[in-house]
Amino acid sequence: MTFIINGEEQEVAATTLADLLLALDYEGGWLATAVNGELVHREDRADFRLGERDRIEILSPMQGG
Amino acid sequence: MLKLYDIEVRSRLLLGTARYPSPAVLAEAVRRSKTEIVTVSLRREAVGGKAGGAFFDLIGELGVRVLPNTAGCHSVQEAVLTAKMAREVFRTDWIKLEVIGHHDTLQPDVFGLVEAARILTGEGFQVFPYTTDDLVVAERLLEAGCRVLMPWCAPIGSAKGPLNPMALRAFRAHFPDVPLIIDAGIGRPSHAATVMEYGYDAVLLNTAVAGAGDPATIAEAFALAIDAGSLAHGAVPLEPRDIAVPSTPVIGKAVFS
């Protein structure tokens, strides 16, 4: 399916959010995810089914002030 | 001790983690400042990227409390979602809430700020709002459930120091029981001492430390200045006056002519 991942259009063979993270080599307990502007909790990613052109944000900790 | 929501801290300095020359310099600045709270952010992680993980581990090793921020958010929706994502990562209800309204000054959008604060406190967040020195906005933030206020003293990163002492003093006087943290615009330790002399409870710094020639040493200088200002405020310093007053008694002065 085609997704908009962190603002970039990408083709990924995944049907759930957990599958998508695995396919793109995202890992770690420090990641936060949102789909179409809504937070998806870590424990819900395996059951969260993705749809065509879903907008997915994958954030991680960064320096800030 | 300073109480921020339900947490007591000894240090009255909060430190940002951005723009340091290296992670080692950041770690040394945190150590020398004796801060107990650092601010952090969230950004998009690259495919296969592990940058966030390395930073997450570094922060964990510092042994300090984390205050995540919504820096760079320009809308209520963006700030609220970023806050929720930050809670997911850092497992804290604390959030430094920024809703930026102006590109050049980085002045908060105070209308959006109040709205976002109301939504977030309703969802159990303990909000630290980055705001202006406007008393009415501050009242609205308290009504929205904020229990700490963080007015700027000058634009973020400008190093200008307190631009409007009258407003900052009025702000302090108007909210005697609310923890007040100066959040932006400090450049030098003397600026920090000055706002602490006004009676502020703490100072949040980033660029003033990270951008200095020797960040770790200036972090320690800031810590000393903040303590000095705090101590001075408690001691009730003299108010300035327009005429001279001799400090040596006139009575008993010798007459030689």
Image (cartoon, coloured by chain):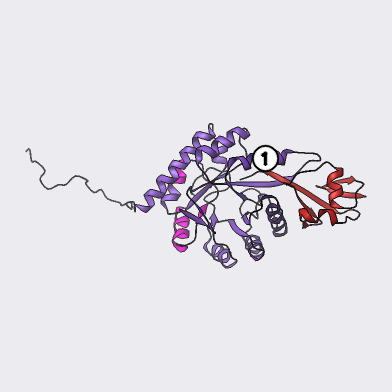
Chain colours: A red, B purple
> Which quadrant holds residue B56?
top right
* Residue type beneath disc 1: Phe
Q: Residue B208: image x %, image y %?
A: 54, 40
Answer above or below: position of B174 versus B248: below
Nearer-the-camera pick, A33 or B145: A33
Residue B256 horizontal/vertical position (percent): 7, 38
Q: Is residue B212 magenta?
A: no
- Chain bearing mark 1: B
- The residue closer to the viewer here, B152 or B160, is B152
Residue span colored magenta: B165-193
Residue B211 visible in the displayed image: no
Where is residue A32 shown, x and y percent of the image?
Answer: 74, 50
Residue where numbered disc 1 is placed: B55
Residue sitting nearer the eye, B165 or A18 = A18
* Residue B212 quadrant: top right
What is the tally of numbered marks visible in this picture? 1
Tell me the residue at 54%/65% (across/down). Answer: B139
Instruction: Indicate whether B171 appears above or below B63.
Output: below
Q: Classify residue B246 as left or right of residue B41.
A: left
For label 1, count other residues whose C-alpha is less than 10 Å away and answer few (under 14), some (14-19) or many (20+): some
- Label 1 sits on a secondary structure element that is helix
